[in-house]
Amino acid sequence: MGENYEVIGKSVPRIDGVAKATGRAKYTGDLKFPNMLVGKILHSPHAHARILNIDTSEAEKLPGVKAVITHRDVPSTKYGLSPARWDETIFCIDKVRFVGDKVAAVAAVDEETAYKALKLIKVDYEVLPAVFDPYEALKEGAPQIFEEYPGNINTEIHQHFGDVDKAFAEAYHVRRDFFSGQRTYHSPLEPHVSIAFWEGPKVTVYSSNQSVHYLQYHLARVFGMPMGNVRVLKTHVGGGFGGKLDPTGLDFAAVKLSQITGRPVKMLYDRKEMFYNNRGRHAQYMELTTGVTKEGKILGVHANFVMDGGAYTGLGVASAYYAGALLTVLYDFDNYKFDMIRAVTNLPGCGAQRGHGQPQPRFAFESHLDHIAEDLGIDPLEIRIINARKPKTVTINDFKVDSYALKEALEKAREISGWREKKGKLPPGRGIGVGNGGFVSGAGYPCYRTDLPQAVAIIKVHDDGSMATLYTGAVEIGQGSDTVLLQMAAEAMGYPLEKMRIVAGDTDLATHDFGAYASRQTLMSGWAVKKAGEEVKNKILQTAAEMMLVVPEQLDVKQGVVFLKAHPEESLTFEEVARTYFVKYGQLIGQGSYKPPKLGGTFKGAAVGTSPAYSAATQVAEVEIDEETGEIKVIEAWDVHDCGMVINPALLHGQVHGAFYMGMGESIWEEVLFDEKGDVANGNLAEYRMPTALDMPPVTSELVDSIDPNAPWGVKEVGEGATTPTMACLANAIYDAMGVRIESLPLTYEKVWRALKEKREKEKA
Amino acid sequence: MYLPDFEYYAPATLSEACELLEKLGPGAKVIAGGTDILSKMKQELLFPKAIVSLKYLSGLSEIRLESNNDVIIGAKATHNSLIDSPVLQEKYPSLCNAAHQMANNQVRNIGTVGGNIVNAVPSADLPPLLIALGAKIKLVGTNGERVLPLEDFFTGPNESIIKQDEILTEFIISEQSLTGSTYIKFALRRSGALAVASVAVAVAMEGNTCRKARIVLGAVAPIPLRAKKAEEMLTGKEITDELLEEAGSVASAESKPISDIRGSAEYRRDLVRVLTRRALRKAINEGHV
Amino acid sequence: MQKIEDRSETKYYLITLKVNGDSYTRAVKANTLLVNFLREELDLTGTKKGCELGDCGSCTVLLDGKPVNSCLVLALEAEGHEITTIEGLSQNDKLDKLQEAFVENAAIQCGYCTPGMIMSAKALLTRNPHPTEGEVREAIAGNLCRCTGYVNIVKAIMSAAEEQQ
């Protein structure tokens, strides 16, 4: 990558590694405060019912119970992560809308008493007919779940760019396929926890959360408090993947219960309750029609989708837009139509999960593209090269794509996977498949309408220059942002990484930042950090110039040494310069702020999918199928990523491994299932089957050179993009192995078995 | 999640334990490893008022070979101690392999063979093979002990003939004529997954002639199910691939699976066909594996 | 094990557990799980609660050197056994080889599975100092990790084993 960097581009161990390896790292659930109570939420046993009466008197009488609250005790202000549809209240008021909906909460001296108190709350329900399938929900006469969504239509999108009908008319070949994707759940290992306590008019909330800012914003808004009186912070977070972005019932209930009792209240979800809180991946039903030339060039695409949103919206409107918006990025075509209906149903509400809205459309499109390649007699990898977007282009829906090395990623994946030697040449039962993906490097616009910057960072150098602290609102949830941002700060300052500390994710003590979602922190928080570091560097050079009687332009600073560029032996230490600055001018501080330029077009929904930079990824995987049982063994996988400049290669490859892992789990094993009452049927980690170490194949993660001009040092995202190619990659490998196409996720053993059985029966007939 | 409270007893002797169970009545349950009972209690599937622990009862964890060549497995033996047992590795490595397919390492370190049987879960991994091997069990109660074939123990999902005052103390495998046995489990993940269908077989071969065959199906009926028609059609026959295929089909027809979140009845039936054929071939060719 | 009753007739049992080499005596209710005893009574919060049903391995501790899920063990049943938690692995701020290997090999992301994962690995290496990759995967198959795909975890355990040589 040409440049010679001191701190970035290096695989330094993560700064929280030792704390986590020794068990010293405190997660929210590990915290204890004096006099702390434990709270629990009462969840609805019915999928759809009117609340006739709630009697909390028996629960209140139980010794050790300190407070019981229902909708009568809290604001009825509606909320949701995206203001497009605020439709959720802290507790249900008139009716419950899914099994697991929030009805009441208790605070008690210990967990056992809290659980016992829940059983003593008497709720009279009038059970209403419920609907669990989006197509059923959209039918005339279906039970109406929300007054504000007639016909159970939560979101309807119709976008048309260019002229798809004309493109189809001119195409050599037009193909239509139908696919579906299942509900999945993030399943972070750490359950959600929230602890709240009050001091005068101010509440402090420790939450296992991906965005301290959004939680602060929503708590302040719903409780009618100034944001300054709501302090949200987090300690170590045990994984998020999108599932800890929305405010939860725990946060609201903890705030209220701690206010009433005057004591700290800790609330946590158990594993099944996490499935109720959900915000996981929507089920999607995807019809795709594509017209191509004889040579395989895509002329136009029509995406016609239906999405099951579950009961509440959260960020679901954005999920619906994302599903179609990013289909235009990977391959270059001029005509595109996107129709989407997001229906509400009586199931837990869906939201953003790794790759937000688009992994399933990618599954659909990449499977569809393999069919088209076969129809035309073109190699599947080749048809992707033919259509791969070029850098410095603009998509038909107005996304500006500057760096883009999808073609290079495809070519490299072809080499390292041995594609040419394997495709069509593997022994029976074995197959190889390819899939492409990618993602935004931060959403161009925040979740709610505001003119706030995306990120602010402050670096404070200690008085004697012996240490520096980075203050950022970026949220470390395991992805490594604390380490990466410190590397960036040290690089920008010319300071050694070992002397850097971080204060992050605290609305009082750190700075503003929208947090960990949409793969935004390396680019967006990184911009703010880089600018803050450069401001420190400029002040150091200025002061050193005064001390050395030269002009700042003659100086540079690296790894804590300020030196004359022409005579590097003439130098001062950063420490002594910083100390001089402190004596002469006061605290040595650098501040940086980042706000992207105006991005995207002007049509309805144009903001979703905009980003300063787009990643691209190719995955190839090899599978082995047991032709009698349908069992799938993933043998090996290769990922080639265009993720711009890499700040920490070890952490980056770790993201790819994890993204493939999650994608593979969602491809074959994971699915949230419901019983006939609409209750989660597999809300545990035995039946919601994330792959074990024995299921995981070797993964090779490689990169292609790419530097994005809109990013600090040219960085781009990696953590979500690498989940998006996997589902199709595996579906295409199964097709290659057995000649059967599984069109619905997950690609279960039973579906493969059934498809093979039907194929044999057809061949016999 | 929380564990409802209960009274806890840790008697020092077996007879004391049986008396306690009788005295406390149906609200009292036995805890050995605890992995199954505690998870059921946390999920509010079981509400015992009292728990009688076997922790101080000595001599129930042993796995030994008697002078008459009987293999004795103490009911408190953990799954991992089965895997590590030199006696089983020598006599019935198939049992080591079956134990290995159960849950995960942590559960196998504490979950006991006795618990795996008494819980009577239809998808349990050890009952099919133990039945195929002709294992007998010893139940000790306040009125003495009884020994009966394990096959006669189960009466339905989570149900068995065990009486309130009885404790399962050991397994006895005394049949000497068997030449091969194996257990094949089909699950939806390589660890920590219950069987969708499983098949255990034990055979006594003489050359290529099958003198005796036992086929036991797991997770496809309310209890571990002997596929007796399939066994019969093999007995006394020369083994061919066609015959094994047919045995698979017959066993498949004998199975009584239900559809649930792990698989449809139709899928399970077909799995029985495939697994039965594969298991027979393996036991015939490779011995106790 | 002494039984005590309070005024509301709730029964407590006086037990002594040996954890990381030290003995701790506490009065607990029968329904106290080992994981809660460690976390609440002894403040050993390195042992995590993930699924509470023995499916994820986050709460793995060693009982007489063998990994078990402390969410499925009664504190009462643990009496008389030696318990080792993640806090018992490093001595005087000196990390165990495995802990070092996890840090060096980028085997940690969110870190929530890490203590349990290391305890499973520790038991493996004690019993089998030179495991194959398959044996490593087998030993940690009861420890779910949502972040890493196990790639660097397996690498870290193998490298700690090599270093032992």
Image (cartoon, rainbow, N blue to C red):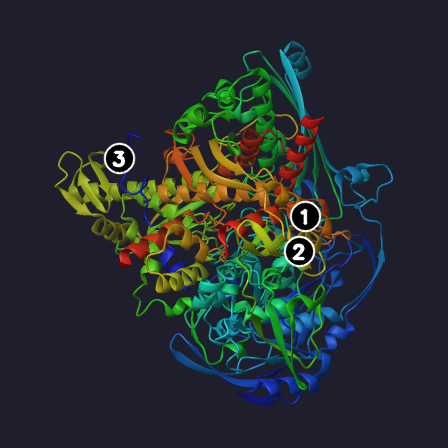
Judge whether residue A734 can be spotted in this image. yes
A661 vs A144, nearest the viewer:
A661
Check disc 2 and give the amino acid type. Ala
Residue beneath label 1, please?
A: B268
Identified at 63% across, 12% down, the residue is A171
Q: Are marks 1 and 2 in contact (CB under 8 Å)?
A: yes
For the residues labelled 2 and 3, the Cα–Cα distance comes to: 62 Å
Distance from Cα at disc 1 to Cα at disc 2: 9 Å
Q: Residue at x 44, y 53 (%)?
A: C137
Could you say which quadrant of the image residue A300 lies in? top right
Q: Share a chain, discs 1 and 2? A: yes
Q: Position of residue A440 (x, y in %)?
A: 51, 34
Q: In this rendering, is residue B193 above or below B174?
A: above
Kind of residue at disc 1? Arg
Give residue B219's mark.
Answer: 2
- The crowd level at tag 2 (other Cα within 10 Å; few <14, some 14-19, many 20+) is many
Residue A454 visible within the image:
no
Q: Which residue is mark 3?
A: A4
Image quadrant where residue A605 sits: top right
